Image (tube, rainbow, N blue to C red):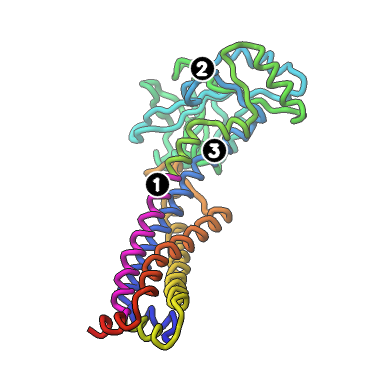
């Protein structure tokens, strides 16, 4: 009986087509999942830097639209269990020649979270540049935002792509630029066990305030849900396209090898042997395709990470959990795609298979 490896070498062209189809599908799943996960991870990391509790305007669809009075910071800071309160304005604006750049207006106490590589922290009318955007703009001494010139006081380095490709300024400058007081408060606690009591007290300050623990906010944030749902839908489409490609190619393989399967049936081998044989062949292709797709995806993600065009905003990482998930998906895709043609081949009358295979 022909071994799976010999069968694959014997049908090299169709094997190559199945391999390419699976590699593309698996790479698509890798990249879509890694990039969407990277976006959520970066934004989550930025919020978690100084905050155990996040306070926003109630009922807003996105933190960029939130506008709360910064005067609430003082009573929140005096609450039992609160260590520190940082105010943050989130916005975006074009910086020639870049079409859009993340702008962060921050309270003075939050400047320490930005690790300077050169210069100093900004004063009024000055900004900090992330190292990524500083390199993209070729180390400018000043930038223009909404027709107003801001001098660059320093450059900072951040592992968070949104920050490293963004502009940081004082809270007052951010408020004037985006015509708002504060987007969010990041509340740091001395004792996490008091978070429920602090949340309740913050809720009593005003009906237009909404306070959540950082983990709860990230789990319920609408934009994260949209990103995850979109990723799942596109990933499912790539999965189905992979299955259809395997079914199509394996049907052609089965048709070409009917004579071989007829002989196997005529010498007394059961239908399950034929099914197992075809599944084994496709599983070998799936494992090779998974390895190649993993390598290609890592290379693409590295290129995206260092591409000036994306300013560090699009980033992704293939984690151990994602690796296991995509491996399981790859195996399932291969088995499901092969099962139908394999069952079809195993149920045809042996004599009919021999006659058609020899025709």
Name the residue located 47 percent from the left edge and 34 percent from the top edge: 166
Q: Which residue is mark 2?
A: 67
Q: Residue 125 location in percent, x, y?
A: 48, 21
Name the residue: 56% across, 13% down. 208
Residue 193: image location, x then y, percent: 77, 29
Residue found at x 41% / y 44%: 233
Q: Is residue 134 visible?
A: no
Characterize the local packing of mark 3: few (<14), some (14-19) or many (20 or more) Cα atoms within 10 angstroms.
many
- Label 2 neighbourhood size at 10 Å, few (<14), some (14-19), many (20+)? many
Q: Is residue 204 above or below residue 222?
A: above
Residue name at image x 39 percent, y 71 percent = 342
Would you identify the image quadrant in which residue 22 lies? bottom left
95 to the left or right of 318: left
Q: Is residue 239 magenta?
A: yes
Measured Cα–Cα span from mark 1 to mark 2: 34 Å
Q: Is residue 261 magenta?
A: no
| Separation of marks 2 and 3 at Cα, in angstroms | 27 Å
Disc 3 marks which residue?
156
Q: Nearer the viewer, mark 2 or mark 3?
A: 2
Q: CA distance from mark 1 to mark 3?
A: 36 Å
First in sequence: mark 1 or mark 2? 2
Which corner quadrant holds the N terminus? bottom left
Q: Which residues are magenta?
A: 232-258
- What numbered label is drawn on residue 261? none
The kind of secondary structure element at disc 2 is: loop
Horizontal and vertical percent position of residue 124: 52, 20
Q: Are marks 1 and 2 in contact (CB under 8 Å)?
A: no
Q: Which residue is mark 1?
A: 234
Q: Position of residue 68 (x, y in %)?
A: 55, 15
Q: Specify few, some or many for label 1: CA neighbours under 10 Å numbering under 14, 14-19, or 20 or more.
A: some
In the rendered view, does 192 fall on the left or right side of 271?
right
């Amino acid at each position: 009986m022909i071994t799976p490896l010999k069968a694959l070498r014997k049908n090299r062209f169709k094997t190559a087509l199945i391999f390419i189809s699976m590699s593309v599908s698996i790479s698509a799943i890798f990249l879509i999942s890694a990039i969407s996960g990277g976006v959520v991870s970066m934004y989550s990391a930025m919020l978690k830097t100084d905050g155990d509790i996040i306070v926003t305007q109630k009922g807003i669809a996105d933190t960029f639209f939130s506008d709360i009075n910064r005067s609430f910071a003082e009573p929140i800071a005096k609450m039992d269990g609160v260590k520190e309160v940082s105010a943050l304005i989130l916005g975006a604006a074009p910086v020639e020649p870049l079409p859009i750049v993340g702008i962060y207006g921050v309270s003075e106490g939050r400047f320490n979270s930005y690790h300077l590589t050169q210069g100093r922290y900004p004063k009024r009318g000055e900004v900090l540049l992330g190292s990524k955007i500083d390199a993209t703009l070729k180390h400018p001494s000043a930038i223009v935002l909404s027709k107003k010139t801001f001098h660059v006081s320093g450059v900072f380095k951040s592992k968070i792509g949104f920050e490293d490709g963004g502009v940081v300024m004082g809270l007052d400058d951010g408020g004037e630029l985006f015509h708002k007081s504060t987007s969010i408060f990041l509340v740091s606690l001395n004792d996490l066990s008091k978070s429920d009591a602090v949340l309740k007290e913050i809720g009593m300050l005003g009906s237009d305030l909404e306070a959540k623990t950082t983990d709860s906010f990230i789990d319920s944030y609408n934009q994260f849900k949209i990103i995850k749902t979109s990723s799942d839908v596109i990933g499912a489409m790539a999965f189905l396209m992979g299955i259809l490609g395997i079914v199509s190619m394996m049907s052609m393989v089965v048709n070409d090898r009917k004579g071989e399967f007829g002989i196997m049936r005529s010498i007394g081998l059961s239908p399950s042997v034929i099914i197992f044989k075809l599944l084994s062949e496709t599983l070998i292709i799936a494992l090779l395709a998974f390895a190649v797709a993993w390598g290609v995806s890592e290379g693409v993600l590295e290129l995206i990470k260092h591409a000036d065009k994306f300013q560090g905003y699009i980033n992704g990482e293939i984690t151990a959990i994602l690796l296991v998930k995509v491996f399981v998906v790859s195996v399932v895709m291969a088995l499901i795609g092969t099962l139908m043609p394999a069952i079809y081949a195993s149920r045809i009358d042996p004599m009919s298979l021999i006659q058609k295979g020899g025709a």
